Amino acid sequence: MICGRLSVSDIKSIQVEDWTPKDNSIIVNITAIGNFEYSIDRNNFQVNTVSSNLLAGDYTIFVRDKEI
């Protein structure tokens, strides 16, 4: 889900690494220039594009512009 001035076309890729039962990572790669934050739960945002130590499962990545 995109919030702010970022569009879906600005997301270059979303990588999933080490897909095991309990130690997984999701990496968001964005081509847009800006000051963005990322979340997998829409409540806890971080500036790091990597979410790690995740349990196996489905996730929605939320991206927002910190300037808005």
Image (spheres, helix red, strand yellow):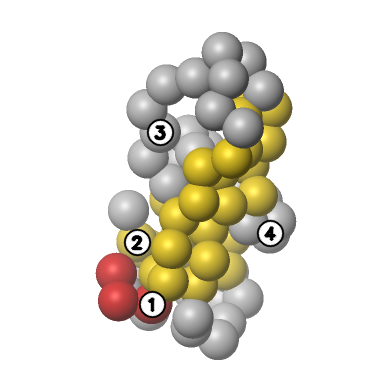
Looking at the image, is mark 1 or mark 3 earlier in the sequence? Answer: 1
The residue tagged with tag 4: helix, strand or loop?
loop
**Between discs 3 and 2, the one toward the N terminus:** 2
Residue drawn at (37%, 40%) of the image: 60
Residue 46 seen: yes
Q: Which of the two labelled residues, at mark 1 and mark 2, occupies the earlier sequence position? A: 2
Residue 37 x, y percent position in the rendering? 58, 60
Mark drawn on residue 2: 2
Please name the amino acid that badge 4 sits on: Val
Residue at the image position 56 percent from the left and 13 percent from the top: 21
Q: Nearer the viewer, mark 1 or mark 2?
A: 1
Q: Earlier in the sequence, mark 4 or mark 3?
A: 4
Q: Are marks 1 and 2 in contact (CB under 8 Å)?
A: yes
Q: Secondary structure at mark 2?
A: strand
CA separation in Å, label 1 and label 3: 19 Å
Determine whether label 2 and label 4 are within 8 Å by CB: no
Return the residue at label 3.
59
> Given the image, on which type of amino acid does mark 3 rest?
Tyr
Q: Dot 1, how many residues are within 10 Å of its Cα: few (below 14), some (14-19), or many (20+)?
A: some
At label 4, counting other C-alpha atoms closer than 10 Å, the crowd grade (few under 14, some 14-19, many 20 or more) is few
Q: Residue at x 30, y 76 (%)?
A: 9
Cα–Cα span, label 2 and label 4:
15 Å
Q: Residues within 10 Å of mark 2 (few under 14, many from 20)?
A: some
Task: Give percent across and percent down for residue 6.
Answer: 38, 75
In the image, which disc is placed on residue 10?
Answer: 1
Q: Determine which residue is flagged by label 4.
A: 47
Pick out the residue farthest to the bottom: 33
The span from disc 4 to disc 1 (Cα, nearest Å) is 17 Å
